[in-house]
Amino acid sequence: MSEGLNMGFDAQLADPSGPDEPAVHHVVPADARPLLLRVSAIELVADTVRAIELVSADGAPLPPFTAGAHINLKLPGELSRSYSLTNGPETLDRYAIAVNRDPNSRGGSAYIAETLKVGDVLPVDPPHNTFPLVEDAELNAFFAGGIGITPILSMIRRLEALGRPWKLFYGARSRSTAAFVDELEALEASSPGRVLLHFDSEAGKVMPLLKLASGIPKAAHIYCCGPGRMIETFKASAGWRPSDNVHIEHFVGTNAKPTTAFDVELKRSGKQFHVEIGESIMQVLERNGIQVSHSCREGVCGTCETRVLAGIPDHKDNVLSTRERDANNVMLICCSGAKSEKLILDL
């Protein structure tokens, strides 16, 4: 997830280098209280990537999560940044993330790299999954670029625990910029043929994703997490596959804004507001003193997902599947607009 970004997801796209899934989202309730987590370990795992472990600061049990989930860290300056969990869901006593120091950081990854230390306590939203793993697939094949390895590592750890088959194609600019290489090489050594590591500086070219993807059976579920160019190539490689078998985690928002004006009614409060062209529902609500859960503000983290009770949304996010968009039961209010004159939301 990047800082203009996965995003909101600050600094999750270190390296450059369709169809969406019918995802079952694990949505954080709007009134969910943040967890209090203490930083228990920080380790440099690549040139600019830090692995960070977080444990309960007040002794409360950590909510369970599923592979592919992320958490939102509440940082000083009212920053909220989303980072994928790297540990498998069998780990119940801590959350593990990995953060790349984005040179264009707007504060999130810079703070984590330069200020955050062991012992610090942070408010953190419970895990939320917009990139779930299909655990019983005949084969799961993963394509990761740069820091895009983070949610995929959690999936691999889960499949290892289940004894299920998987393959990984992981590309980075160089070996020194790639995270978790030692663990991935150990997995390959234990059962050869599952891990292909590609470093542009050694190969003299980017990873041949189209060629590699063509060798994955049609029945397999395939996943991609990485920079924009990699995701576009991945989409181009997947057009012949069943859309339900193709899964993508975007780390960059669409930068889209509503293109029509409309009214929005909040069913629970009875309040109604007008949304002008070019502004988001979230901006209007915040301007009127109504706070909603959010992180990326770019339609990639799913934190602001809201139930639609009436009206037709104009979806502009990178989270919802085609099936979810067609159903029009939920929308991301940080970026999406309306095709109807009015929306009624469950707020």
Image (cartoon, rainbow, N blue to C red):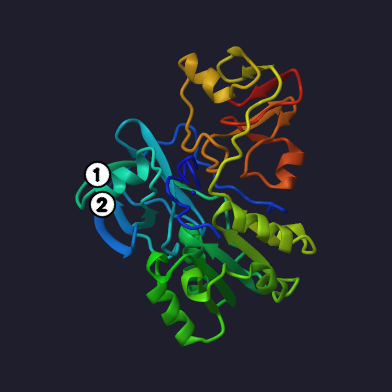
Judging from the image, what secondary structure is the residue with disc 1 in? strand
Q: Is 164 positioned to the left or the right of 240 in the image?
A: left
Type of amino acid under label 1: Val
**Residue 252 rendering spot, x and y as whole percentages:** 55, 45
Q: Nearer the viewer, residue 170 or 157?
A: 170
- At 64% from the left and 51% from the top, the residue drawn is 23
Tag 1 and tag 2, C-beta contact below 8 Å: yes
- At 47% from the left and 75% from the top, the residue drawn is 202
Judging from the image, what secondary structure is the residue with disc 2 in? strand
Q: How many marks can you see?
A: 2
Is residue 259 in view from this perspective?
Answer: yes
Q: What residue sits right under mark 2 in the picture?
A: 39
Q: Relative to 30, does residue 90 appear above or below in the rendering?
A: below
Gap in Å between the C-alphas at discs 1 and 2? 6 Å
- At 72% from the left and 53% from the top, the residue drawn is 18
Q: Relative to 9, does residue 264 appear above or below in the rendering?
A: above
Residue 121's tag is: 1
Q: Relative to 176, does residue 93 appear above or below in the rendering?
A: above
Type of amino acid under label 2: Val
The furthest residue to the right = 240
